[in-house]
Amino acid sequence: MIDQVFVVGTGRCGSTLISNILRLHPRIASISEFFSFITDLGCQVSTAFPSHEVDGVWLWRLISTAWPRQNLMIRHDVAMDEVLYPFQGGGAHRFDRNSGVPAISQVTLPHLSGEPDALLDELEPLVCALPNGTPGTLFAQLFELLAVRQGSDVWVERSGGSLRIAHRLIEHFPRARFVHIVRDGRDVALSMSKHHGFKMVLICFQLLETLGVDPFVSMERRWEEDMSDDLASLLPETFSREAFLDFSTPPPLCGHYWSGEILEGLSTLDSLPKDRLLTLRYEDFLTDPAQTISRLIRYILPADPGDEAAFVRRASGLLRAPSTRWIHSEEKARLQLEDACQPGFSSLSARGLQW
């Protein structure tokens, strides 16, 4: 039986590094950003986790759809750095910025294969043939297909910001184990404030609050006359790259967001037995890589981690020197950021995690 592991975090917490580290291990199928992209940056979570049974055709439609938010970003040249599909044209690749890129092809498949289009074609009949089951059952079967294909003993799914859906993952994957990656919230907030994906999520929240409907789903524009010109320039039909880049995401706002994710996420993870949760600090990967990578790999492959020393050496090559950017902020901004992050730090401190 293929083992199941999730890496969860707040987003901008260093979890992408974990996916890249795990991809180096021949017995681990590193499933990257699957839930981020099939939920259209977390804005369609309920669509991916319905309460009724689903089938393989449903799953194929979900993963092969070119969802609107992420493809709007691709079309206007503000795609997230995480996107790996070579959509900018050239070569024999099937999709480009005008056609749109399927959700599973944006990161998950190119992270696993140098030929994501061929892998997409290979998966279609296999996925469509899956029998009825819960969403979690079908997701697990898809991940097993990918793991078996490359001879792996375990699959590890990691999506940015997945701490927000940890309760759904625990519910739908009752035997899965979890790795929680935690990073200094002040550095997370600074990184969030510059990240295009996080900016798009905040824009979508503001549009929904103003219009009362999701403008990516409904064409109702009842309150459009009351919108500022800047916000109107972020509607899907009038989207402006310049307005997107100018949209402000202040670090203290991101700090409050981080604290909220931490509070909710820790409350959820507290429900797990101790043997199903490993918590690691991102900073420890940078300051003590050998020990931290060893803890990670022994947890994921407890029976036999393989040539651990060789893997640690390879994985350590992906790491960079530690840096703490928030400390260089001017005093007023630093104090505002620390105040915003304090609830999250207090919750982490109560569980023995200090900065």
Image (cartoon, rainbow, N blue to C red):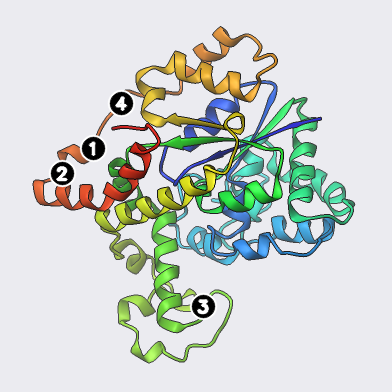
Q: Are marks 3 and 1 in contact (CB under 8 Å)?
A: no
Give the percent coordinates (x, y) of residue 316.
46, 17
Q: Quadrant of the N terminus?
A: top right
Task: Identify which residue is drawn at 27% across, 30% down.
Answer: 323
Q: Which residue is mark 3?
A: 215
Mark 4–mark 2 CB contact (< 8 Å) = no
Q: Amino acid at mark 3?
A: Pro
The Cα atoms of the two marked residues, 1 and 2, are separated by 7 Å
Q: Secondary structure at mark 4?
A: loop
Residue pictured at 49% horizontal, 44% vertical: 82
Q: Name the amino acid type tagged 4.
A: Pro
How far apart are the two marked residues, 1 and 4, measured between alpha carbons? 10 Å
Callout 1 crowding tier (Cα within 10 Å): few <14, some 14–19, many ≥20: few
- Label 2, residues with CA under 10 Å away: few <14, some 14-19, many ≥20: few
Amino acid type shown at disc 2: Ser
Q: Please report whichever mark, 4 or 2, sits nearer to the chain's N-terminal start.
A: 4
The residue identified by callout 4 is: 322
Mark pair 4, 3: CA separation? 41 Å
| Label 1 with label 2: CB-CB less than 8 Å | yes
Residue 17's spot in the image, x, y percent?
A: 48, 32
| Position of residue 60 measured from the top left corner of the image (x, y, whole percent) | 77, 56
Q: Which residue is mark 2?
A: 329
Mark identifier at residue 96: none
Assess whether mark 2 and mark 3 are in contact (beta carbons under 8 angstroms). no
Residue 54 horizontal/vertical position (percent):
81, 61
